Image (cartoon, rainbow, N blue to C red):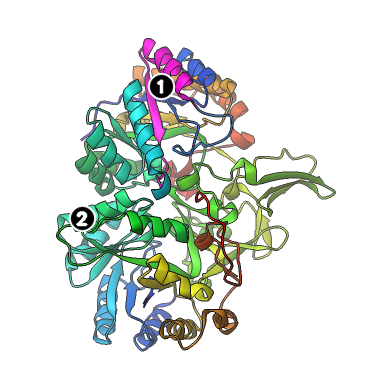
Amino acid sequence: MKLSLGPLLYYWSREDTLAFYEQAAKWPLDIVYLGETVCSRRHLLRLPDYLELAEKLSAAGKEVVLSSQTLIESESDLKALRKLITDGRFKVEANEWGAVRLLAEARLTFVAGPTLNAYNPDTLAMLAEMGATRWVPPVEMPREMIKDMLAALQPLPNSATWIETELFGYGRLPLAFSARCFTARHYNLQKDDCQFRCLDHPDGLVLTSREGEDFLAINGIQTQSAKVMSLAHRFDEFAAAGIDVLRLSPQARNMHRVVEIFRALAVGDIKPAQAPAQLDRFMPAAPCDGYWLGEAGMAFHPVNTPVTEGEPA
Amino acid sequence: MSNPALLELICPAGSLPALKTAVDNGADGVYLGLKDNTNARNFSGLNFDEKSLVEGIRYAQGKRRKVLMALNTYPQPATLSRWHKAVDTAASLGVDAIILADPGLMDYARKTHPQLRLHLSVQGSATSYEAVNFYRERFGIQRAVLPRVLSLAQVENVIDNTEVEIELFGFGGLCVMVEGRCLLSSYACGDSPNTFGACSPGHAVRWEQTPKGMETRLNGVLIDRYANNEKAGYPTLCKGRFEVQGETYYALEEPTSLNSMDMLPEMARLGIAAIKIEGRQRSPAYVAQVTQVWRAAIDAVKKNRETFKTQPAWQAALAKVSEGSMNTLGAYYRPWK
């Protein structure tokens, strides 16, 4: 089981971001995803900065992937996308189909990101045929559906490698994207004059129900779960489901602790049942694992309980 | 390149009576779905079985109107054949086009029924011409419905760089999130538009009168609470009142309807192929009202785009049927963002 560090979904200061990746170079990770996937207004790091980071991480033995923006709205978004792809030194994670088109045209292999919505083997096979060497299922896809996907996928005729499956295994779930910035809205600012208030919320801005239940987290134009998806206690289910890579999504504090615990799981130093107690104090919020079980994403089953089989929701 | 502005009026048909109402009131086309999760309005009591579909197609096409079938959810491995069968049904009954979101399903439709016209659904989340042209090159799509996230200037940029016809939402319920990229509903209750075909589905909804007021819940999560003088609305997740840093408000979006009628002259200038009216879950009375008003408005703008003015009577008629009785220009108007 390989471990990856997903793209940073939040907006941190330049110093904090650079320090984070300087540390990450030393963490027991196999793959690091870099790049801005949420908002094109975030500019403290630009492509040359990411490329410099990529070189450093690569020199530290990490596989580096550059993640593309999820919501493309303007010509300047497309320009940035083309630059990312034409650099060519590092593999790209495509997060919408315009990027897939450009990558396939350039005959480059790529990672198919979670927002490409590959919900069935036909679409997944098409992505593989166009050059995807790894895919990230939509974050809502249950374990049983991932199994069905891989069971139905035929190996490509001229392909030496099987497409890898990377599961979003830890972090606040990226649930929705909008043209509207909800952080700016909270501060009664327009998006074009947002004053970059995201900088004040390094793990997102929690939205609660009127009964005080933590429900969602606002992250600019992205809406996340308030709870942290954590599948640490289900680590022994991944092999049977065909998972090759587990994605850990960056958080502002104690990320190295999180990575170390998952590495300990991967090498068998700790048992899945022991993981939640160890992880607990390093998590910014309570855990959830419902999506993996085919339930409401916010649900949580602390122990490994059997799930009734049925048609996936 | 810009096509001549067809400005077809495409109206929602959640049932056979709604279809007939839309046709009788001047829709150029209707869109509809089957009674299952192959389309994104999978609500009980809505949609078409084969018998009503045959009758609907006969009625609409008999009056030279188009029938577009939405198969715009994402097929899943265990039930893939359901979507394939739906495409076959659409082809054999002779619908004018099918509206799809999933590339795998487009590939099936293209190979199995090459004569069938394909539209890219808003659920396909294509917001750039690079994405639209991907579907064009690969599957020969003829039209794309753009998500309700682009400003008109951004729409123009798409139109300038593709030969695919562009359809825009004109009126009705407003998704604040990019369609096809929203999992809020499944996070709360397990079912999302992508796979189940419904957002905030009825089975997860509870209404409860309490001493504090009427409460609406989705799988137990309090979405909104209404004072006695407030009209309670359906607990669509993104339109509830929540608390952020001690402030309670519509944190994501107010319960408003999209109404882009003021932008019709600009849409005509851009060469928009069709205007879509949202609301397959609404009554035939809604369909009648909205279709009549938009028919009049589109006829007026086609006659003279320079002198076109939205009539107060039209807006009054639409306000009566708007969700939350409020209207917004949505993302077409930049400050909304």
**Badge nearest the viewer, 2 or 1:** 2
Residue drawn 55% across and 23% down?
A: B312
Which residue matches tag 1?
A: B298
What is the chain letter for disc 2? A
Quote the CA–CA distance across marks 2 and 1: 42 Å
Residue A270 against residue B196 in the figure, above or below: below
Which quarter of the figure has residue A29?
bottom left
Residue A227 against residue A59 in the figure, above or below: above
Residue lying furthest top: B62
Residue B193 visible here: yes
Residue lying furthest right: B211
Which quarter of the figure has residue A207?
bottom right
Answer with left or right where residue A156 lies relative to residue B14. Answer: left
* Count of numbered badges drawn on the protein: 2
Badge 1 marks a residue whose secondary structure is: helix
Residue B164 against residue B127 in the figure, above or below: above
Which quarter of the figure has residue B270?
top left
Magenta segment boundaries in residue numbering: B48-76
Answer with left or right where residue A186 lies relative to residue B276. Answer: right
- Which amino acid type corresponds to the residue marked 1 in the rendered image? Ile
- Which amino acid type corresponds to the residue marked 2 in the rendered image? Met
Q: Which of A244 and A20 is in front in this view?
A: A244
Residue A299 place in picture, x, y as percent: 60, 62
Q: Is residue B71 magenta?
A: yes
Residue A176 place in picture, x, y as percent: 47, 55
Residue B161 visible here: no
The quarter of the picture where the N terminus of chain B appears is: top left
Mark 1 is surrounded, within 10 Å at the Cα level, by few (under 14), some (14 to 19) or many (20 or more) other residues, namely many
- Tell whether label 1 touches label 2 (CB within 8 Å): no
Residue A130: numbered disc: 2
Residue B264 place in picture, x, y as percent: 40, 29
